[in-house]
Amino acid sequence: MKPRLISGVQPTGRLHLGNYLGALKNFVDLQNSEKYECFFFIADLHALTENPTPSDLKKNVFDLALDSLAVGLDPHKSVMFLQSQIPSHEKLFWILNTLTSPGEAERMTQFKDKSKTQAKSVNLGLLNYPILMAADVLLYDAEFVPVGEDQLQHLEITRTLARKFNKKFGNIFVEPEALLTNTPRVMSLDEPNKKMSKSRPKGCLFLDDDAEIIKSKIKKAVTDSGKEIVYDPKRKPALANLISVYSALTTWSTKTVEARFKKMSYREFKDRLAELIIRHFEPIQKNKKELAKNLDSVKRVLASGAKTANEIANQKLLEIKKKIGFLVY
Ligand code: ADP
Ligand code: TRP
């Protein structure tokens, strides 16, 4: 049997290059490697922590489903589903809450950051966020979780909860491992010391940006002093970020990119990079437009994925409840 992997993305707006290189492109590569049994879901319960309006939530869910299919996730190869359609996630979430101390949740970097950036709408969901994430993963006995670097802390809590439960009630959970890409932390184009994030749209390159916008954003991207194209993350972090993007989109090593562009100016390198991104995004944007013509077929993909996911998750929840001492028939 192939090892199982699972990952989710929140439907909270347009996907950017960081989401793509840190998560989605990797999902597609892992799926196509045929080495894993793959489960990918839209984390719509998690998205509630940002208090979306009902129409925004619906739009974002469809958008993310379309993006996922457009980049190459294939419902014939991967199970694709919507988190809110699998009730066992919320049930295991409650159980895992009772094994977590407030301090463990309060020290999470994402919680601390979001408590500041969303100061007006801090809610308990933000605090409990990693516990729901643990439930998402543990229900499926997933051995691997492909994510960007910012999610590693949450995965650590997941592993801790698996261990705690196993110790208290008997061995039932697998401790999952993260799968990072070579670009686990794509940096912002305008502030290369911060990660690219949709909470700072100015530094983002979005998957649906058109050619002119891509050219202009790359042209304006901050670069370091000096002239030479060298990959040096310590001394030239902004340029290193651009070189690693080039490397991720070509599968050339950063050394190869450096060697190929050594004699060029920053401007020439940026022009080439913009061209590469435009060429890479074009077919994705075209696919998305085509897929958007048939939203019913997107709904069918999610319904079929939910059926498979519910079977696995319900069975696992039953075993969990038995271990805890609930009366189950
Ligand atoms: P954002 O930080 O923009 O809100 P999400 O939290 O929705 O993005 O992240 C979705 C996925 O993309 C996660 O697996 C996350 O680790 C990954 N990811 C987000 N930002 C980056 C980045 N700058 N570099 C690499 N991966 C990222
Ligand atoms: N927290 C992840 C993010 O911000 C999304 C997510 C929710 C997730 N549940 C998960 C990722 C389970 C991996 C596994 O992107």
Image: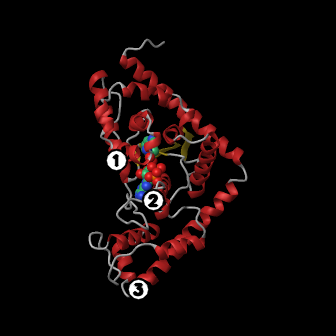
| Front-most of residues 78 and 240 | 240
Q: Is residue 57 left or right of residue 292?
A: left
Q: Quadrant of the N terminus?
A: top left
**Could you tell which of marks 1 and 2 lies nearer the N-terminus?**
2
**Could you tell which of marks 2 and 3 lies nearer the N-terminus?**
2
Q: Secondary structure at mark 2?
A: helix
Q: Is residue 78 visible?
A: yes
- The colour style of the image is secondary structure
Query: Around disc 3, counting alpha carbons within 10 Å, would you say few (fewer than 14), some (14 to 19), or many (20 or more)?
Result: few
Question: Residue 6 in the image: x percent, y percent?
Answer: 45, 43
Q: Is mark 2 within 8 Å of ligand 1?
A: yes
| Front-most of residues 198 and 275 | 198
Residue designated by label 3: 265
Q: Residue furthest bottom?
A: 263
Q: What residue appears at the point 39 percent right and 63 percent down from the top-left corner?
A: 187
Q: Is residue 290 left or right of residue 259?
A: right
Q: Is residue 106 left or right of residue 54?
A: left
Three-letter residue code for mark 1: Leu
Pointers 1 and 3 in contact (CB under 8 A)? no
Q: Secondary structure at mark 1?
A: helix
Gap between marks 1 and 3 measured at Cα: 36 Å
Question: Residue 166 in the image: x percent, y percent?
Answer: 30, 27
**Could you tell which of marks 1 and 3 lies nearer the N-terminus?**
1
Q: What residue appears at the point 72 percent right and 50 percent down from the top-left corner?
A: 294
Say which quarter of the image contains residue 288.
Answer: bottom right
Residue designated by label 2: 18
Q: What residue appears at the point 48 percent right and 73 percent down from the top-left corner?
A: 218
Three-letter residue code for mark 2: Gly
Residue designated by label 1: 152
Looking at the picture, does residue 310 appear above or below residue 179? Answer: above
